[in-house]
Amino acid sequence: MLSEAVTSLNEEAKAGREAARMLLKLPIEDWQVILDAQPRLLGIGAVEVLLEAAREELDRDPGRALALTTFLVGYLDSIVAPRELDVIRQRIFGLAWKEYGNALFATGSLEEAAHAARRARTILDAHPALAVDHASATMLLALVVNAQEHPSEAESLLAECEDIFAAHGDKTRWLYTIELRAMILFDEGHLEEALALWHRAHAEAERIEDLHELARIQNNIGHCAAKLGRLEEAMRHLEEAAQRFATLGMDAEVQRARLCIADVLERAGNDAEALATLHSIQQECGRRGMHRLVRTIAEKIDELEGATK
């Protein structure tokens, strides 16, 4: 029975990949019409491929990632899988809610992101085989609650998942825990400690050859160096990070690096150039649905324009 279910899943996964590739060529608002006509087109295999596409879009266009994951979590109850494969079904459902939470966080909806992360944790808590995925959803919740200015809760959640990643040899996610710990230190004003931890994370990212995280970490190093008043060092790291982001197609992350560059320009007394950069970033972030960042930039523009009058 199980072997038949696995064979069926493999066949469905192959068809699902083709269905997902077809859907990704079309506007998301057209998907429901297609699925109404072919209700079995979107199965577990297709959802898995679409979630991978959503993860890639997070660094490029968070607004599209949100539209994609919003559709998926709304469609989950329509997906049928053999009872023998219920763990696989639970995993895909939990990951869908986690990626939905990631997209909500990236576009600035913190309360909704926290709810999605908690929903993902509940789903992924159903089976011991999903421990790493459950810990990944826990990491997302830690990221969100830290952004909500609850560092103690973030630290507690971080400790909960750190050992799981280490025990399972998940080097990439273990690297994320170092980065988040540095972020918490940074937000609490422990800049030297945060910088030292980000340098440690940078060395680890180089060791495992994770180019995406290298770029993110270098951006954080530059941002932290700027806060410490080391402007030349900061600008060097930020410009290199922006170049790495651009090369990797991480267009949304380019804007975050440019925001830090604007901060360095302002600190160096180049207010006009900083303002021009901020206005440009504001437009780019708006096009990508990065609403929380747009609000932050608008506040910075108001402050800087007020100071130059």
Image (cartoon, rainbow, N blue to C red):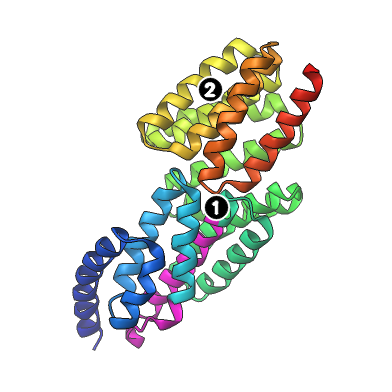
- Tell me where residue 171 appears, x and y as whole percent: 43, 44
Q: Which residues are magenta?
A: 76-103
CA neighbours of label 2 inside 10 A, class few (<14), some (14 to 19), many (20+): many
Question: Which residue is farthest front?
Answer: 309
- Tell me where residue 28 appears, x and y as whole percent: 39, 63
- Tell me where residue 305 appears, x and y as whole percent: 75, 24
Q: Is residue 94 above or below residue 155?
A: below
Q: Main secondary structure of the magenta part?
A: helix
Check the picture and name the quadrant holding the C terminus. top right
Instruction: Tell me what residue is drawn at x 63 percent, y 36 percent.
Output: 182
Q: Is residue 100 magenta?
A: yes
Q: Which mark is residue 129?
A: none
User: Is residue 192 something that shows in the picture?
Assistant: yes
> In the image, is 58 to the left or to the right of 145?
left
CA neighbours of label 1 inside 10 A, class few (<14), some (14 to 19), many (20+): some
Q: Is residue 123 above or below residue 202?
A: below
Instruction: Tell me what residue is drawn at x 44 percent, y 33 percent.
Output: 205
- Helix, strand or loop under label 2: helix
Q: Circle 2 is placed at which residue position? A: 238
Q: Are marks 1 and 2 in contact (CB under 8 Å)?
A: no
Residue nearer the viewer, 166 or 290: 290
- Helix, strand or loop under label 1: helix
Residue nearer the viewer, 119 or 194: 119
Q: Name which quarter of the figure residue 115 lies in.
A: bottom right
Q: Circle 1 is placed at which residue position? A: 163
Residue nearer the viewer, 292 or 115: 292
Closer to us: mark 1 or mark 2?
2
User: Is residue 220 something that shows in the picture?
Assistant: no
Instruction: Tell me what residue is drawn at x 76 percent, y 47 percent.
Output: 149
Which of marks 2 and 1 precedes in the sequence? 1
- Tell me where residue 44 appears, x and y as whole percent: 33, 73
Between the C-alphas of marks 1 and 2, the distance is 32 Å
